[in-house]
Amino acid sequence: MSVNQSVSRQRFRLQIVRKGDVILNLYKHLSPLTLLHLSKKMPYETHAIRQRNTIVMPFNIIVGKEKTRDKYKRGDVVYSPQDGAIIIFLHDTIPSRTYNIIGEVENGIELLDSIKYAESIRIEKIE
């Protein structure tokens, strides 16, 4: 069974004001505690902030490290315990720190590429 067919998948909509929607697949089996805490906060409004080759979305939860990786690909969705933020990678990268991998972008990554500085967003569970 591939990650895309996983029974632990939860779908979320990231609505970028005046631009459109990005669909995220987040997986319980990758970081169960992180996803549990994120789900409890939904729907959530914050900002998507462009920082080099990532989109950073501040998210007010406290979770420790969980199933981290040291290499990420374009479209990976992670949670940064150090920053208290959801991060989406826009390019393949090997960052200087590790993050809790929570999922991937299913559709709409081109909208994230169009963010230059910051955009208002709303994140909600759709399934």
Image (tube, rainbow, N blue to C red):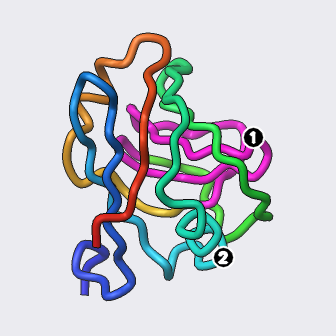
Residue positioned most to the top = 116
Q: Could you say whether the residue bearing mark 1 is in a helix, strand or loop? A: loop
User: Neighbour class for label 1 at 10 Å: few (<14), some, many (≥20)?
Assistant: some
Disc 2 target residue: 33
Disc 1 target residue: 83
Quadrant into which the C terminus falls: bottom left
Above-or-below relation of 27 to 75: below
Q: Position of residue 42 (x, y in %)?
A: 50, 60
Q: Position of residue 27 (x, y in %)?
A: 43, 73
Q: Could you say whether the residue bearing mark 2 is in a helix, strand or loop? A: helix
Which residues lie in the magenta part?
73-100
Answer with left or right where residue 6 lies relative to residue 84. left
Answer with left or right where residue 23 lies relative to residue 83. left
What's under tag 2, amino acid-wise? Leu
What's under tag 1, amino acid-wise? Asp
Instruction: Give the mark nearer the N terminus: 2 vs 1.
Output: 2
- The residue under the point 29% across, 65% down is 126
